[in-house]
Amino acid sequence: MNLAMNRKIALVLILLCAAGSNSFAQTNSTPGAPTAAIAAAANQFLATLDEAQRGKLVFDFKDDAQRKRWSNLPSAIFKRQGLRIGDLTQPQREAALAVLAAALSPQGYQKILQIVRADELLKRSSGEAMFGDEQYFISLLGQPSTTEPWMIQFGGHHLGLNITLVGQQRTLAPSHTGAQPAIYELEGKTVRPLGRESDKAFALLSSLNESQRKQAILGFQMRDLVLGPGRDGQTIQPEGVKGSALTEKQREMLLDLASEWTGILHESVAKVKMDEMKNNITETYFAWSGPTEKGSAAYFRIQGPTVIIEYAPQRLGGEPTKHIHTIYRDPTNDYGTKWWKR
Amino acid sequence: MVEALTRALYRLSLLVALLAVPSTVFAHRDDEYLQATLVTIEPNGILLQINLTPGIAVAEQVIARIDRDRDDVISADEASAYVESLTRDLTLRLDGRNVELNRTGSEFVSPEELRTGSGIIRIEFSTKLAALLSGTHKLTLENRHLTTISVYLINAAQPRLATIQITGQKRNDTQSVGEIEFTFHPLSSNVPASARPN
């Protein structure tokens, strides 16, 4: 019997003995709701906490250090603040998740759960305590409100969600999503938290003619995100094929690809963002680096006047297609600043 | 009862999922030294913002080059000496002529943080341009710093003013060399690029 098999059997035994709770069971809350419902969910969560916990959870809205305290890295390496999911009781965890469920679309909420479950699998297969579904943090900046600006942060390994709310306006920018493993089996189904992003990108690439491909494909390696965590306020010169050079069908495919990020939030605000992207589609670029065979490890970027999206397979930890980092930014409105900053 | 069953099924499904996960896992930068450079071109100067992130497996090599007395503290002198060594490994050319780089800022995290694979050293260089002529120009940056362990990113920042327009970017395969073509038209008013008509 080989070493790998012994390892897996050992892990199975550990799992069978484990009586750990399921931190991320599906909540019954209705995903995707207006700001009032999100604020109500946040207030319900606050009501489950004692004073010390509320003190840890809530930051001043003007606390820029906390606003920018997010990363793709595990919490043991990058120190987050707020409340750790693993330190909450089960009712408190459910109330915390209900806040996310209220703020996100059903598919966005599902994506987040799948990313977190991937990290739980990573913990169990690696034996590293720094991974796992208990190592995620939630925090609020400002008080839940339907009029005043406030913010929900939820993050941990491969996840940095920054949701800024100002009245009925909401933005997810900047946010990081990622996954390792980026493909796994759960409940008899193959789960790919970021699989639609990859599938849609390859479909768009394969729709390009020779001239368009020549413009889209960058002739050099892209080993990481350019505008990942810690790159606030920076904007790069766009590259790749311009939307004006795409057919109507290809433009639709590009928007559909971008919707995998813009659609993480509730559809009402996602539609506003998508309408904005449609208006800017001729000024939006699609760039590609790496192999072009479907399913291979390739980097791509979407960049328009109000959006930057990057998708970067990572060479760290084996097969790059199984370890993905992505970033979503709005160069004109990261953290919703145009709605509240004077 | 239903909830207990749901949780049992969840644990069982995680168990099945686990069997499908490869045992080789490592989740952060390991054996590469990422050197990411953002190049900002203005009518009167050029700014290079370089973020240096050593992976866990190469952190000691990088720290050894910075913390020369091995006291596990990066002193101001050690930081300056490292910036000097980086400067020697960089060549910036404008229209074929070498341009002098001046350090305008640097931020070193502790060796302890660098060893995590997440610590970022930030260094800024700038150079003043006395009289940039109207027309097309070519800026070339070559980075030869620790080539055996490094991976590179070089990108032009989107210009802040309409007088500067990036017309092309080329890199070699590893991005250790980047070439930025741009135009300068001083007669355009110095309005923000965002206000430029499409």
Image (cartoon, rainbow, N blue to C red):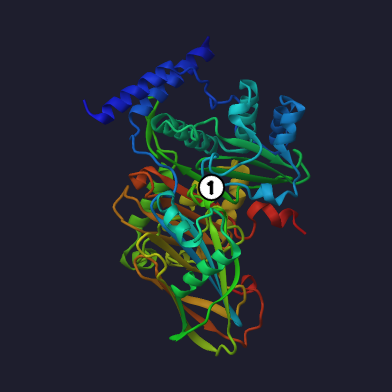
Q: Using the rendered view, name the quadrant where residue A160 is placed.
A: top right
Front position in the image: A117 or A157: A157
In the picture shown, does residue A6 fall above or below B90?
above
Q: Using the rendered view, name the quadrant where residue A34 is placed.
A: top right
Residue A32 seen from this side: no
Q: Is residue B126 left or right of residue A56?
A: left
In the picture shown, does residue A293 fall above or below A10?
below
Q: Amino acid at mark 1?
A: His
Q: Position of residue A111 (x, y in %)?
A: 50, 37
Q: Residue at x 52, y 23 (%)?
A: A22
Judged from this view, the residue extending furthest toward the left is: A1
Q: Quadrant of the N terminus of chain A?
A: top left
Q: Residue at x 53, y 78 (%)?
A: B101
Front position in the image: B28 or A22: B28
Q: Write down the residue under mark 1.
A: A176
Residue B177 seen from this side: yes
